[in-house]
Image (spheres, helix red, strand yellow):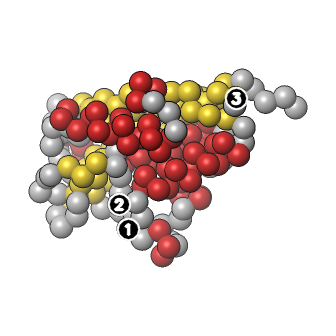
């Protein structure tokens, strides 16, 4: 069977905000009074990106590849996990065409950090920052993200046959 020239994936992740944790989004540490709770560094943006890439190739999700029951991934750097996911993409004969991600977060304001996030994601994926879009929005104080209880992220990706 011939490989399709393009594959599209979608990823989603959510984590609760808690005290005494660093807030890391897109591989960037953001000064804030709370951080995201999770087995790894809980970077919801990178988890959504990883899930989009894996999903595009029907390879499951990051929980399948890096289970939260495995102590080896306790406190793991999600940028390193993303690099491992990109290796899996390459092994399947594809490359990242582009990514478009949205972070849903009431506070803190993320605009000052977006370019750094794009650069870190692009480097992990082996592409230019022009191929990576990161946007942030609030939910107008509605729902768990709007109430400041957590942060979520969505990502869509296009993979191209290498």
Q: Position of residue 80 (x, y in %)?
A: 47, 56
Mark with earlier residue (1, 3) = 1
Residue that label 2 marks: 41
Describe residue 26's horizontal placement relative to residue 150 as left or right.
right
Mark with earlier residue (2, 3) = 2
Question: For the residue labelled by badge 3, is the local secondary structure a helix, a strand or a loop?
Answer: strand
x 15%, y 52%: residue: 31
Residue that label 3 marks: 161
Describe residue 9's horizontal placement relative to residue 104 as left or right.
right
Describe residue 110's horizontal placement relative to residue 134 as left or right.
left
Q: Which mark is in front, 2 or 3?
A: 3
Question: For the residue labelled by badge 2, is the local secondary structure a helix, a strand or a loop?
Answer: loop
Bin the neighbour count of mark 1 within 10 Å (Cα to Cα): few under 14, some 14-19, many 20 and up: few
x 57%, y 33%: residue: 96
Visible in this render: residue 156? no
Describe residue 96's horizontal placement relative to residue 23 as left or right.
right
Label 2 to label 1: alpha-carbon separation:
5 Å
Question: For the residue labelled by badge 1, is the local secondary structure a helix, a strand or a loop?
Answer: loop
Q: Are marks 2 and 1 in contact (CB under 8 Å)?
A: yes
Q: Position of residue 97 (x, y in %)?
A: 56, 27
Bin the neighbour count of mark 2 within 10 Å (Cα to Cα): few under 14, some 14-19, many 20 and up: many
Label ID, residue 75: 1
Which of the 4 quarters of the picture holds residue 121?
A: top left
Label 2 to label 3: alpha-carbon separation:
31 Å
x 79%, y 30%: residue: 3
x 44%, y 41%: residue: 123
């Amino acid at each position: 069977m011939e490989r399709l020239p393009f594959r599209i994936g979608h990823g989603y992740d959510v984590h609760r905000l808690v005290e005494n944790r660093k807030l890391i989004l897109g591989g960037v540490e953001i000064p804030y009074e709370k951080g995201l709770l999770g087995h790894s560094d809980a970077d919801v943006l990178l988890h959504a990106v990883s899930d989009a890439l894996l999903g595009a190739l029907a390879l499951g999700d990051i929980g399948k590849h890096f289970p939260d029951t495995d102590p080896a991934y306790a406190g793991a750097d999600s940028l390193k996990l993303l690099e491992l996911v990109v290796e899996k993409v390459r092994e399947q004969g594809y490359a990242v065409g582009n990514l478009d991600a949205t972070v849903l977060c009431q506070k803190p304001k993320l605009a000052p950090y977006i370019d750094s996030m794009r650069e870190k994601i692009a480097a992990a994926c082996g592409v230019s920052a022009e191929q990576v879009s990161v946007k942030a929005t609030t939910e107008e104080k509605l729902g768990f993200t709007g109430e400041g209880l957590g942060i979520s992220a969505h990502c869509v990706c296009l993979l191209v046959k290498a």
